[in-house]
């Protein structure tokens, strides 16, 4: 009958309470949507917000994903097909917390000006096992970079890239670099002043780089250098001036000269004397 209450039925909530509940539900839904957006993960990648890590490994990517989550600190883009890094490659969206970037094994051929610009937290960069033919000296932009470790092992296509590499290192923006790995590249020679703008360099790896001489290299600016690996090269002689430079470095405690093609002539006497007097050198 009209107006008769149904036994056991819950009376409807007042209008004000229903509106409040709907408002709360809407806030939850909106919050969930924004949380999903801030923690979004590109389709071919694996993401962990807890570890601040994104892995896009062996996915045949031809470009850097443009929807990387802003929380990313560790980014692995290894084993893809990133032939080129264009200006601002990591700017959309910005990655203010990115500290480690691994781009090894990508068949990477060119790095353009500004490719690594505007990464204010980048400390470690791995470009090893690539095929670089073009390397812009302005790859890190024109402002000082926080980069501390740079791995370019087995990454240069041929010896013609060496002048561009020297210009990049001498550009003046990598003053915080403490570790530089250049092993397994066909360098043949090192341009004069190649390391003069790296005052904080502590570890320099030049293994298996086909070096035949160090006569033009200036090491005297590397006051913080602790270890130098020159093994597995084609060095035949170290000039007295080069030895004097190395001996003058206050922090240098380990030099590896093993597996070179030393020639036993008058020139070698300087090296022999150094080996007798110093505990820095290993072979």
Image (cartoon, rainbow, N blue to C red):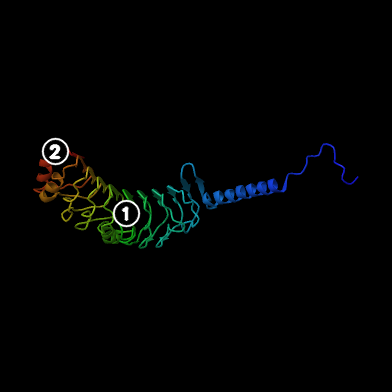
Residue at left offset 72%, top offset 48%: 15
Q: CA distance from mark 2 to mark 1?
A: 36 Å
Residue at left offset 16%, top offset 42%: 250
Image quarter in which the N terminus is found:
top right
Badge 2 or badge 1: first in the primary sequence: 1
Location of residue 182 in the rendering, given as x and y in whole percent from the top left corner: 29, 51
Residue at left offset 32%, top offset 61%: 138
> Which residue is tagged 1?
145
Location of residue 147 in the rendering, given as x and y in whole percent from the top left corner: 32, 50
Classify residue 127 as left or right of residue 212.
Answer: right
Category of crowding for the residue at label 1, using alpha-carbon neighbours closer than 10 angstroms: few (below 14), some (14–19), many (at least 20): many
Reply above or below: 87 against 15. Answer: below
Location of residue 59 in the rendering, given as x and y in whole percent from the top left corner: 50, 52
Residue at left offset 38%, top offset 52%: 129
Per the rendering, the mark at residue 278 is: 2
Residue 158, quarter of the rendered image: bottom left
């Amino acid at each position: 009958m009209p107006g008769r209450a149904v036994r056991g039925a819950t009376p409807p909530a007042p209008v004000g309470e229903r509106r409040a509940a709907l408002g709360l539900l809407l806030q939850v839904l909106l919050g969930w949507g924004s949380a999903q957006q801030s923690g979004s993960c590109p389709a071919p990648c694996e993401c962990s917000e807890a570890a601040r890590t994104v892995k896009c490994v062996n996915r045949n990517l031809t470009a850097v994903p443009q929807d990387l989550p802003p929380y990313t600190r560790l980014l692995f883009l290894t084993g893809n097909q990133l032939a080129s890094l264009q200006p601002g490659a990591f700017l959309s969206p910005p990655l203010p917390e990115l500290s480690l970037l691994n781009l090894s094994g990508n068949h990477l051929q060119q790095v353009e000006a500004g490719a690594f610009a505007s990464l204010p937290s980048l400390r470690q960069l791995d470009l090893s096992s690539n095929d670089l033919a073009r390397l812009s000296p302005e790859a890190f932009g024109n402002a000082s970079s926080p980069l501390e470790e740079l791995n370019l092992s087995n990454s240069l296509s041929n010896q013609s890239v060496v002048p561009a590499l020297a210009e990049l290192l001498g550009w003046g923006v990598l003053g915080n670099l403490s570790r530089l790995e250049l092993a397994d590249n066909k360098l043949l020679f090192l341009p004069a002043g190649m390391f003069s703008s790296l005052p904080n360099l502590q570890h320099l790896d030049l293994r298996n780089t086909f070096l035949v001489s160090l006569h033009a290299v200036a090491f005297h600016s590397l006051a913080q250098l602790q270890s130098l690996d020159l093994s597995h090269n084609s060095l035949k002689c170290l000039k007295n001036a080069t030895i004097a430079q190395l001996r003058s470095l206050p922090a240098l405690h380990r030099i590896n000269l093993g597996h070179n093609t030393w020639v036993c002539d008058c020139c070698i006497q300087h090296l022999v004397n150094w080996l007798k007097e110093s505990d820095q050198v290993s072979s």
